[in-house]
Structures are given as C-alpha cells and as structure tokens.
Amino acid sequence: MTGRAADFQDANLQEMMDRAVDQCPIGVALLSPQMRQLRLNRAMCRTLGLRSETEGLGLRLTDILSTPETESCVARARLVARSGEPGVWHGVFRLPGQRRDHAVDVFLSPVKDPAGRVCGVLVVGFDVTEQQLARQRLALVNEATTRIGSTLDVTRTAEELVEVAVPRLADLAMIDLLDSVARGDEPATGRPEGAIPLQRLACGSVVDGIPEAVARPGQVDVYPEHSPVAECLASGRPVSYSGEGRDVAEWARADAARAARIVRHGIKSMMLVPLRARGATLGVAVFVRHQRLEPFAADDVLLAEEIVARAAVCIDNARRYTREHATALALQRSLLQQRQPVQSAVEVATRYLPTQSGVAVGGDWFDVIRLSGSRVGLVVGDVAGHGIHAAATMGRLRTAVQTLADVDLEPEELLTRLDDVVARLASEQELSAGAVDLSATCLYAVYDPVSRCCTLARAGHPLPAVVKPGGAAEYLDLPAGPPLGLGGLPFEEVEVELPEGSLLVLYTDGLIESRQRDIDAGQDAMRKALSEVHLRPCGPSLDTVCDSLVDALLPEQAGDDAALLLARTHALPANRIATWNLPADPAVVADARARAARQLAAWGLEEITFTTELLVSELVTNAIRHAHEPIQLRIILDGMLTCEVSDGSSSAPQLRRADRYDEDGRGLMLVAQLAERWGTRHTATGKIIWAQQPLPH
C-alpha cells in the first residue's frame, strides 16, 4: 500500500463525513423507504423547527408538520423510492409560530445498495425564500411598468397603482392627492404647513367594501399637522409603521378615528410613500397589511418606492395633460358663441362635441349673426389641425366673419375676404414660428324671413342638408369652392327658396367622417337619421334632432371634434311689413312721413312716431337728392323697428362732420344719433340704407 493510500485509510473519514453533514448550512436528511427520518443535520432541524436531531428520528415529515405541502413533498419522495430516479420538489410552507412563508427547493436522490435496490432517499433542501421574493418583486415592478399609466386619466392611473399593489404587496392600498393639486393648482415644492387636505383618488382592499378606509374615492380628508402622513409629505421620504405599541400611539395623538380603525381591523403594518414627480410632492400612497402576519420589510419599502415613483410620473403626466386639455377646451368654448342673438328668422339648436380620443381640441366653430332687414347669418367652419393654435385661429376667423357680416357682405364676397384673412394669418405664422399650411373650411348662409330665400356659399366645406316640410332630407347642390387660404379660385353662391318650417342642417366633417366611414357613407347615414327623426309623430324639437344625429353618427371615441347647427326657418307675417314705392320728388317726403306715422299707429307704436318720422324724412331725402329711382320705403316690425330706403344707386353714403356753412352732411349724423344701429347693404339693383330703433317697453 502506498503512503498516500495509507494516509487516507488512517484518517477517520467517517467521523469527518458526519461532522461535514452536521455542520452543512444546507438542510440534509436521510429517509427510509417507509419515509421515516433516519438522519437529520442541524440545518434541517432548524428548518423543521426541531430542537435536536434525535427529536425527529423515526418520524415521518407529515408527523412533524401535517400540511398539504408536506404531504405533497412526501408523495414525491415515495415516487423517488419506488422508481429509483432522482426528483425535485418545490413548495411553500409556514411552521407553527412563524410570521412568514418559506419557499424551498428540495432535491430527492435515491440511495442504493450494491445490488441496486433503493434502501433510502437522500433529501437536500434549499431555502429559496429570498430568491423567490426577489423574483416576485421584479415581476411586480415589470407589471407596474406595463399597467400603470395606460391612460392620461389621473383617477384611472391611481386605480391601476392600487390594482398592482393589492393583494401582491399589501392588503389595503390608498392613493391620496393634495387637494390643491387635484383642483388643478401646481404642486408646491416647499414643506406643507398646518392641516393637510388630501383628496382620495383610489383605494382597494382584499376585504369587500373596504371597511378599513376612512375616506372613499372623491372625498377630501384632512390630516392633522403632526400626523404620520404629514410628516411623510414634509420629509419626502417613505416611512413604515407597525400597528402596535408606540406607532399606534403616534396615530392616536394625530387622528383618533384612524387609530380606532387600526385597532378594530387588526392592522399590523403600514407604509407611507410620498408621490413625488419632477421635484414636487403630489400626494401620498398608503399601503397596509392586516391579513398577512409578516410586517413590511426594508425590501418592501424599496419596492413600494419603485412602483410609486413610476406611478407618480404617470399621475403628473395625466394631471398636466388634463389641465392643458381643459385649458384648451375652455379657450375654445369661450371663443364659441355663448348666447345666441334675439331674432325670429330661424329657430336654432347647436352642439359642439370635442374629441374623446385624447387628441387636443380642434378648430370647429358655429355662429348665428343677426343681420339687417330681419335676416340672419348662419356660419359653420373648421380650422385644420388641433390644439391651442387651432382654437386661437378659429377665434380670429370667427371675429373676422362677424365683422364682415356686419357690413352686409354677400356670402361669396364674405368668403373671398375671409380667404384673404386666412392667407395673411398663414403668412404671419410662416414668418414668426415656421407654421405653414394654415387651412380652414367654412359655410356661410344668409336667410331672409321676408322673402324666405336662403343664399349660401361654401369654401371646401361639406354640403348642407335641408329637410322641407313633408319632404325627405336632401343635400343642396352647392359649388364646393376651395378651402380658405389657398386663394386663386372664386367662390360661388346659390339662392334657394325655403318654405316656412324647413330644417337647414350645417355641420363639420367630424360629425360624418371617421376612420371607419368616408364622407359619402357619413352623408348617407345623416340622411337616414334625419328621415327617421322626422317620421316620428308630434314634430320633434330641434334639441331632440341634435341628440338623435349625434347618437346616430358619432362613435363613443370620436377621432375629431364636431360642430352641428340646426336652423328651422320662419316667415315674417305680411302684417309686420309695410312697403311704399316713392317717386324721386322732394314733395313726397311729407307723404312718406305721414304714411309711416299711420302705420305705427296701426301697430300701437305712437311713442316712437316722432323719431321714426325724422328717420324716414332723412333717409328718403338722401335717396331723392343723391340717388335715382326706383326708390322704396319699407318698415319692418320684428323685435325692433327697422326703416329701410332702397334706391338705384350703388354709391354708399359716408358719415362725416359738416362744417358751419355746409349744406350737406347733417342728415346721416342725425340718423346715427336717433337710431340704435344703421348701415348700408348693396343689392343687385342698387343699395339699401337702413336704421333700427328699439321698441317702447
């Protein structure tokens, strides 16, 4: 025998092996084929809660700890003993008196004699609790990354944070936002002082009804100045509390109601994590355990910090988007018509429907403008693009349309002037900010209740629809015209006669066009919806028609904003209009005054007879001296009294201050002083000078 072999034989290898197994930090056990304990090392004794090796000898694992998990492990060991093939078992169990579960990986290896028969099973157990917790925490962080912030909605983002945390991290989670931040203010960067009002965004619990929570979503709760929540917000760092002893006393001193709930529901551990984003504190996230025995550990605090930090950025993004979207929407609504003018030419109903797809507000608008001669102007337009820029441009165009309509331009001429305005705005934007390709569409219609004629022109806008009494919906054959801002092509107007009670439908393309439906299909859908509405008995109101069109044409998530204007036409009764053709003779002025006085007496308006006579005298005299025939005087009673004098001259009078010795220039000055409004509008044969005055109360 060599010297080396002798050294090995001389050594007490069995004793060394026994020591090695006993001192091994990994749990080791030897089982008989009947699954009884033959040998246990110290680590396995600690794992099974045994005081010594001898305490467990001869016992089965199920005798020491009878749970479904241990029975599963023993069943796996029996299979190894029968098959002679090694196996692995993974499970989770908790020993009596322990506060947390343990995850273990157990390797089972058959022990065979020289004949190959299985005479035992070697069990080697690894406590992989920390590794499993690390994997769970990583999975939770990954889930938080993908789930939190799926929408730009503050409340939904907070709900997603609660859904991620409960029950995998906590038994109860509550997300509170500073009340000032929830109302739209910017978060303060300094230390909060005094009592702190917080608005609850979301809360969730493993217990139905969430009885542990003091406040519900949407409610505002006030935390005292020295409460744990206030201290967490002031420090900007997370803190954890145990629901016993001194920590409960801290809550009790600050908030007796919450301290009582802590005791009542057996709350064992709490974490308070501030919601911080971009250097400012938005609120606080509260995590509670009352079903699980183990308290929050340091790793749990780090995990909560990680997912709350991600959620805080998403909440801040949603808060900023909501504020900016609300600002843009408020700007756009403020630029839209707030109150319709008093007029009797048409009955009007309108709708403005902002997009719900997360896109910024657009540039759709509508307007109802009272014109001279009891006429009314109806406008619908759409600025290309979205956002503050489109809304501001819409406001400028709406103002331009009102100004141009106020000088009584015909629809085709108004659109021509508006086209110049858009081209100038585009040029200014190109020079200042590089924003080019400004474009808009518009439809302008003027309805006259005296003649029941409607004159329309459009600039690249969808065709208007008309529903005549007893008839089906149809689209007016109106030349398209180029969109505003392109220039170079003329606009054409069309005049149609509308019976009293006709329905005129003006709208923007967002109402009929979408990704799933082109404009032709949208117009067919509108025609069908209008026909169905008008087939209903008892003539629906315009608001009902508006709602029916919106429900039939707009999807729940519209991709573009839309504007809708409905106008039901009226005709001015003949007994409200008085007309006289006059010769170009100065002697007729007195006769015109007398006729006007008699008409006012018939209407019961004697109180304004003197003023009306002066207006008639000046307007008729002006037409006889400075124009030529045909001359006509017309008086209209429609909410106010309008005196109109038409003549065959296209030259418009100019208001000027007359010098001391001038023979002309004082007539229009007198008209301007006596009338509430006055003006000139051109016709195909000349012009009309008109003056309006209010009726006596």
Image (cartoon, rainbow, N blue to C red):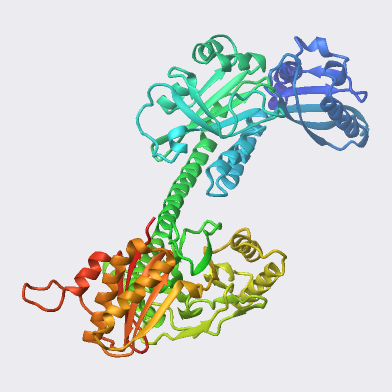
Query: In the image, what residue occupies the spot 37% across and 88% down?
Result: 684
547 above or below 617?
above
- 507 on left or right of 100: left
Query: Which quadrant would the C terminus be assigned to in this image?
Result: bottom left
**Looking at this view, is 185 or 550 the one in front?**
550
Q: Is residue 162 left or right of residue 326?
A: right
Q: Where 168 sits versus 244, above or below?
A: below
Report the front residue among 30 and 366.
366
In the rendered image, the quadrant that contains the N terminus is top right
Give the camera-side residue of 139 and 257: 257
The answer to whether residue 563 is seen in the rendering is no
Please say if 102 is above or below 647: above
Q: Residue at (33%, 63%) from the top-left corner?
A: 608
Please tell me whether residue 176 is drawn above or below residue 223 in the rendered image.
below
Locate residue 273, reporting x and y percent.
50, 29
Residue 462, x across and y down, in percent: 53, 76
> Is 552 left, or right, of 572 in this rendering?
right
Q: Residue at x 59, y 69 (%)?
A: 514
Outermost residue, left direction?
661
Residue 107 in the image, given as x and y percentages of width and height: 78, 32
Residue 551, quarter of the rendered image: bottom right
- Identify which residue, 194 or 304, lies in the foreground: 194
- Left or right of 336 on screen, residue 149: right
Say whether residue 501 is visible.
Answer: yes
Q: Position of residue 492 (x, y in %)?
A: 44, 86
How many numbered marks have been drawn onto this rendered protein structure?
0
